[in-house]
Image (spheres, rainbow, N blue to C red):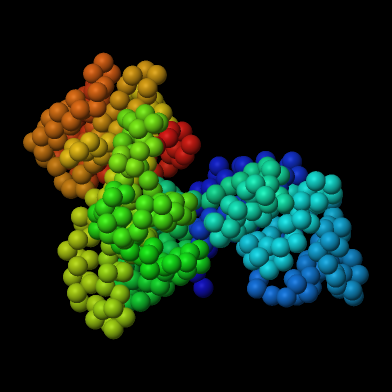
């Protein structure tokens, strides 16, 4: 059995507990294994509650289970002697102030759609305490609160639980070096259960070999998750593998998949909604320009899926046959290059934390990538009101003083392409290791030693936009 560990989620806990005090209808959703149930269990501590995990079963079995839970919270033996005969009866019998939690609610809603109407009536006229509907089918849970659903407009809080940021994911491996934590985060991202699959007594590479290439739990998890949410798995596989190979524009993906534009847009929209793919435009573009397809790039947002489609899916046949020499050689050859992309995401989290703690020359309100034709800047952070900009290059390598000067010189050249002539500019280099590191008034230089100083600082979520 995997040891449970609760990390981070302070902001989510606060929101849930505030909602509980208002007799609210709360929707909690997110992909499987992201930690939704553990978050709810932490949140309901100290509150009277009924927690029910919805299963694929006949309604009478669900009612029998709910009867036992009513007996436990009320002590009334009538629920044992004569179990409930309907969900209407259950809602009538709920005690005042009790939190109702339906986990994997999409199963109950699919098998017994009438429950949505009963919930509408309960929330509108009979509510006695908060109701929490939790689900792992992101698409279905979002549909439950859309226009036309019986519970549309009735939720007080909708909480999408996201993977942990790097600085929290690192807490799962206190004995790992920062570099080893980055390797781990690059392979499994911020999903708590995936992090718990890694054994800290082994190196990240040994864990990766065991879990992916020797067909451990994480080997089959990606396609299991996709089957849980999607149809046309072969098309999604083609899109995700194509993005992992560097086909990032809409036109490139259309050529690769041979889908017409409207169909490809729908597939990409689903992947973006699920949080597997992210859609980006240059950070400096206005709203109208950002809406155009030619300005858009797609990338795999989730590190677990990015790793799987970079190193595992292309070699599934060999791995299934136990012939792992070629896939393993490919991993060893390309993993460090792959970590360069992972490190860019971590560097963004690092700058967001510095922004929160007021340790940058100015407080930015937006951060993201910038590109134009063949020119790119890894991270650009803007404060449009003050007309101040920070431009950063991120390098997953060791740099000497000469390297830093060359990068800064090129960064200044590229900054002239942003049409921000009258803006105050700060230039930044973030690397694995920098020799003779020095910063000045408008030049910032950071490496992993600086990341270590931030490990126990508060999260930056919600403070700036991308």
Residue 108: percent from left, percent from top:
68, 65
Residue 73: percent from left, percent from top:
81, 61
Q: Left or right? Give the position of 340 relative to 27.
A: left
Q: Residue at x 36, y 35 (%)?
A: 290
Q: Left or right? Give the position of 154 relative to 331.
A: right
Q: Residue at x 81, y 48 (%)?
A: 127
Residue 92: percent from left, percent from top:
87, 57
Q: Residue at x 27, y 66 (%)?
A: 311
Who is closer to the viewer here, 334 or 288? 288
- Which quarter of the rendering shows the C terminus? top left
Q: Give the image quarter of residue 428.
A: top left
Residue 35: percent from left, percent from top:
53, 57
Q: Give the image quarter of residue 388.
A: top left
Q: Residue at x 81, y 52 (%)?
A: 122
Q: Residue furthest front?
A: 260
Residue 344 visible (yes or no): yes
- The relative height of residue 267 versus residue 427 in the rendered view (above or below) is below
């Amino acid at each position: 059995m995997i040891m449970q560990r609760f990390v981070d989620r302070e902001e989510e806990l606060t929101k849930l507990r505030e909602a509980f005090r208002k007799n609210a209808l709360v929707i909690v959703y997110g992909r499987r294994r992201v930690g939704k149930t553990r978050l709810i269990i932490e949140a309901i501590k100290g509150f009277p509650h009924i927690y029910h995990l919805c299963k694929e079963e006949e309604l009478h079995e669900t009612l029998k289970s709910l009867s036992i839970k009513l007996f436990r919270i009320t002590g009334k033996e009538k629920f044992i002697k004569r179990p409930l005969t309907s969900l209407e009866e259950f809602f009538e019998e709920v005690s005042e102030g009790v939190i109702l939690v339906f986990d994997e609610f999409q199963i109950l809603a699919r098998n017994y759609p009438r429950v949505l109407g009963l919930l509408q009536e309960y929330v509108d006229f009979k509510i006695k305490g908060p109701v929490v509907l939790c689900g792992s089918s992101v698409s279905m849970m979002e549909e439950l609160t859309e226009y036309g659903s019986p519970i549309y407009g009735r939720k007080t809080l909708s909480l999408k639980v996201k993977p942990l940021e790097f600085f929290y994911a690192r807490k799962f491996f206190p004995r790992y070096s920062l570099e080893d934590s980055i390797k781990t985060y690059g392979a499994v991202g911020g999903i708590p259960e995936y992090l718990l699959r890694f054994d800290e007594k082994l190196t990240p590479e040994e864990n990766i070999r065991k879990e992916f290439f020797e067909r451990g739990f994480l080997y089959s998890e990606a396609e299991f998750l996709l089957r849980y949410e999607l149809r046309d798995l072969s098309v999604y596989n083609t899109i995700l593998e194509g993005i992992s190979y560097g086909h990032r524009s809409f036109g490139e993906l259309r050529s690769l998949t041979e889908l017409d534009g409207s169909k490809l847009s729908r597939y990409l929209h689903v992947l973006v909604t699920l949080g597997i793919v992210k859609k980006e435009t240059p950070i400096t573009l206005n709203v109208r320009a950002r809406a155009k397809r030619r300005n858009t790039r797609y990338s795999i947002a989730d590190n677990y899926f990015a790793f799987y489609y970079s190193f595992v899916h292309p070699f599934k046949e060999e791995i299934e046959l136990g012939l792992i020499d070629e896939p393993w050689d490919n991993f060893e050859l390309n993993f460090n290059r792959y970590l360069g992309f992972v490190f860019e995401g971590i560097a963004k989290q690092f700058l967001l934390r510095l922004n929160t703690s007021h340790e940058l020359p100015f407080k930015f309100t937006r951060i993201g990538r910038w590109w134009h034709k063949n020119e790119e800047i890894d991270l650009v952070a803007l404060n449009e009101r003050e007309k101040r900009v920070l431009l950063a290059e991120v390098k997953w390598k060791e740099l000497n003083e000469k390297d830093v000067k060359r990068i800064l010189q090129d960064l200044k050249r590229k900054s002239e392409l942003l049409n921000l002539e009258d803006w105050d500019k700060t230039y930044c280099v973030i690397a694995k290791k920098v020799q003779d590191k020095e910063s000045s008034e408008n030049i910032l230089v950071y490496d992993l030693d600086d990341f270590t100083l931030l490990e126990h600082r508060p999260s930056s979520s919600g403070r700036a936009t991308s």
